[in-house]
Image (spheres, grey):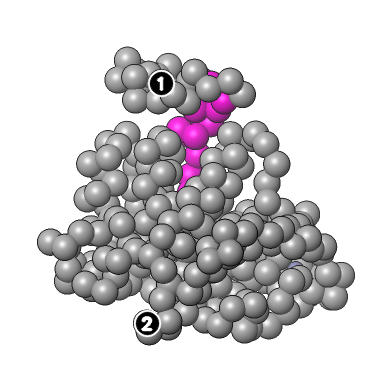
Amino acid sequence: MAFSSEERKRYARHLDLPGFGAHSQERLRAGRVMVVGCGGLGSPALYYLAAAGIGLLGLVDSDKVDISNLQRQILHATPDIGRPKTDSAVGRLRALNPHVRLEPHAEHLTADNARDMFAPYDIILDCTDNFAAKYLISDICVSMKKPFVHAGISGFCGQLLTVLPGKSACLRCLFPAPPPLSVPESSPTAGPLGAIPGVIGSLQAVEAIKFLAGIGALLTDTLLTYDGLEAEFRPIHAKRNPACPACGAGAKTKE
Ligand SMILES: [Zn+2]
């Protein structure tokens, strides 16, 4: 289906971008991205994905907007305090781009509901804030062979990794069991600096857009770390672990 004249104006910068163009924009319109977490990482990721014209965006979050979220969770605003984050996010994203179909889930991601939730989507973004959810997303995506983009933040630092299950290293290839990160799990009193999830969540959106458009090189087999204080990005190269408890030869995956 051709783009309407409104869509052609809206996406003009993409349509004119060498190496992107109408073909890639059409792939974004046909694309389906699930974003787990509508907080610090999910806010910029969802904003840029909606702005880019992704066909279907899934949102998962069981929380309500708290005033302490507003220092970094830029999808939500002061009048949204007390509202479910999915409601606030849907309102903001719909105002930004009415062409995007939004599928909110105001519930907690669990081992029981994750497979059904993830099934309709091409790629999953892990925008959660705790190890349990990150390992759940990695394990479910590996078992479903569903591509996903892991991310984590703490203090002044962040990291991300794109995973193509069966082809590239998964979270457990790098860190077989929690706590996996080189930085401690974030707590309400330990930051992060508000703009750090902005950096990392935006990078997750770039990974999803490249994946859907089929362009560029994905951040697979490389954990990219960012230290905001040192102004330093560092790629840590990784390989699939044949003994990985999730994707290794002996792994018991529930197909
Ligand atoms: Zn693995």
Residue in the image at 25% along x and 59% along y: 76
Q: Is residue 128 above or below residue 162?
A: below
Q: Which secondary structure, mark 1? A: helix
Q: Which secondary structure, mark 2? A: loop
Residue in the image at 48% along x and 50% along y: 202
Q: In which quarter of the image is the C terminus?
A: bottom right
Residue that label 1 marks: 12
Q: How crowded is mark 1: few (under 14 residues within 10 Å), some or many (20 or more)?
A: few
- The amino acid type, in three-letter code, at marker 2 is Pro
From the viewer's perspective, tell me whether residue 98 is left or right of residue 173: left
Name the quadrant containing residue 157: bottom right
Numbered range of the magenta stretch: 20-35
Residue that label 2 marks: 188
- The residue nearer to you, when weighing 145 against 54, is 54
Q: In which quarter of the image is the N terminus?
A: top left
- The residue nearer to you, when weighing 17 against 210, is 17
**Residue 184 at x, y percent in the picture:** 55, 82
